[in-house]
Image (tube, helix red, strand yellow):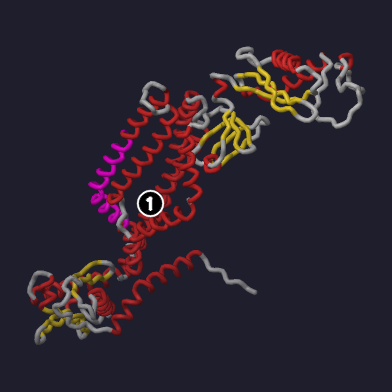
Amino acid sequence: MKQSVISGKAFGFFLISALWVIMFFPVAAAGQEARDENPGPENKKNVAAVKVDGNILFFVVGISSFPADERAAIISQRIVKAASDRSIPADSVYIRAAEDHLNIYAGKEFIMMVTQDGAKAEGTNQKVFARVIQKQIRNAITSYRQVRSGPVLLKKSLFAAGAAVLLIISLLVINWLLRRLNRVLENRVKSMVDTLENKSFSLIRSVHLWRAISILFRTLKIIVIVVVIVVFLQYILGLFPLTMGIAAYTLSLFLTPLRVIGIDFINFLPSLAFLVIIFLVTRYFLKLIKLLFTGIHDGGIRIAKFEDEWAMPTYKILRVVVIVFALVVAYPYIPGSETSAFKGISVFLGVLFSLGSSSFISNIIAGYSMQYRGAFKIGDLIEVGDQVGFVEEQKLLVTRLRSRKNEEISIPNSELLNSNIINYSRRSRDLGLILHTSIGIGYTTPWRLVDSMLKQAADRTEGLLKQPPPFVLKKSLDTFFITYEINAYCNDVSKMVNYYSLLHQNILDVFNENNVQIMVPAYEGDTPDLKIVPKDQWNISLEK
């Protein structure tokens, strides 16, 4: 199939024409179908401006059944229609008196009626208001025809061409200046950024900082170019009658938000001052209480029956309370807080939080509970269920352990709160942790000999404490053997597994040296030979 191609100029002309039709065709249609009727005295605040080519001529009032903006559009269309008919002279606009109002005509074309109520809305009498309107309509017709005359259009076309050339030159100059500025920044600022990286010991990376500066510079460049193009296009569109409406509309697109923002900002200044005061008071109050609790945590400040470990969790709770209180006080002064959209978003977030935060809240509460319980500290060796590891990190939601195999174990705080916790480290710092292991020895071996051998094995184990001395317990008298338990103290739980291994190794050696058979596993029937390893076989090398 053959495809049609539309040129850029044709597309631009089509776009401008479409906008012009959209903006002005409804007004023309309304002018053909509606009538200018007496608005009456009702609703005098219903006022609209009559405009021609974007220029305001005067204001008219309306009623609920015939709004002022619709009436103003009809009158504007009638003035444009009279101005387009060059057979109607501009000075042919005249006033004709009726019973209770005055009618204004342009030749034979009816333009509008002037009532006493409309004149009162402008603060004048009916005749004076009619003369003012007559003069404005004459000037509008004259101006309408003048700006559409051949010489004026040719002159403005030359102005538009000159403006286009000036726009191109301006863009080239701006681009050249921005390139020069970019080189200056690259030569001067980049060296400062590199120096900052060296002074911060690479905490601040020069590459990232320079990239941020480059992005900011490119953004500024785009903004400057867009502003220049908009200004020139605004000027060019404002030269011609067909595009004056587009120029006025596009200008209002930029100026109306700026004006609204400016007015709202001025009105917001008292609330902004209040918010700034709340922010400063809250910030320095938080710094003060942080200083207090940091002193308690470091041991510089002592409070009776208040543990040092409770300081930072208590500070975090108070910080949340203070921030929430500040937000409650500041809420009415936040822009848009009274709008339905803001309230709807607040309700929506509250519902989401309440639906999805049950486990989240329970873990937070459990995290604070665990910190106040003081069951363990960072670095302690603990056992939770079947998990054993060193406490690496304790957060509000989860506690992380490091196992002896360097595995990371993450346990939710809610699970910790409902579990039994064995802390191997706490007592070992002061009293020492008791390591213990059990063996079974037959009844034919004197228990005093067994005690001595177990104590000797503990004494040989490097890392176990000599004081308090090891001791032996007789746990049970079983069917075929006696269960002995050796207990020895250590104060370094990080090597507990190594101590157990060395202790078991030394027990085997001592019992083999003394030809004493270990009866576990138990035997119901056995040969008379001793179940020991002869000394000459202790160091047998592996066969290759």
Residue under label 1, please give it: 227
Q: Position of residue 434 (x, y in %)?
A: 62, 22
Res 92 visible? no
Residue 280: x percent and y percent? 30, 37
- Residue type pointed to by label 1: Val
Quadrant (top left, top right, bottom left, bottom right) of the C terminus: top right
Picture quarter containing residue 231?
bottom left
Q: Residues within 10 Å of mark 1 (few under 14, many from 20)?
A: few
- Residue 349 in magenta stretch: no
Span highlighted in magenta in the image: 257-284
Query: Nearest the camera: 402 or 484?
Result: 484
Please tell me whether residue 321 is drawn above or below residue 474 in the rendered image: below
Q: Does residue 270 belong to the magenta stretch?
A: yes
Q: Can you tell which quarter of the image residue 160 is in?
A: bottom left
- Magenta region, main secondary structure: helix
Q: Secondary structure at mark 1?
A: helix
Viewed as shown, does residue 130 lie left or right of 214?
left
Q: Is residue 109 left or right of residue 101?
A: right
* Left or right position of 13 against 250: right
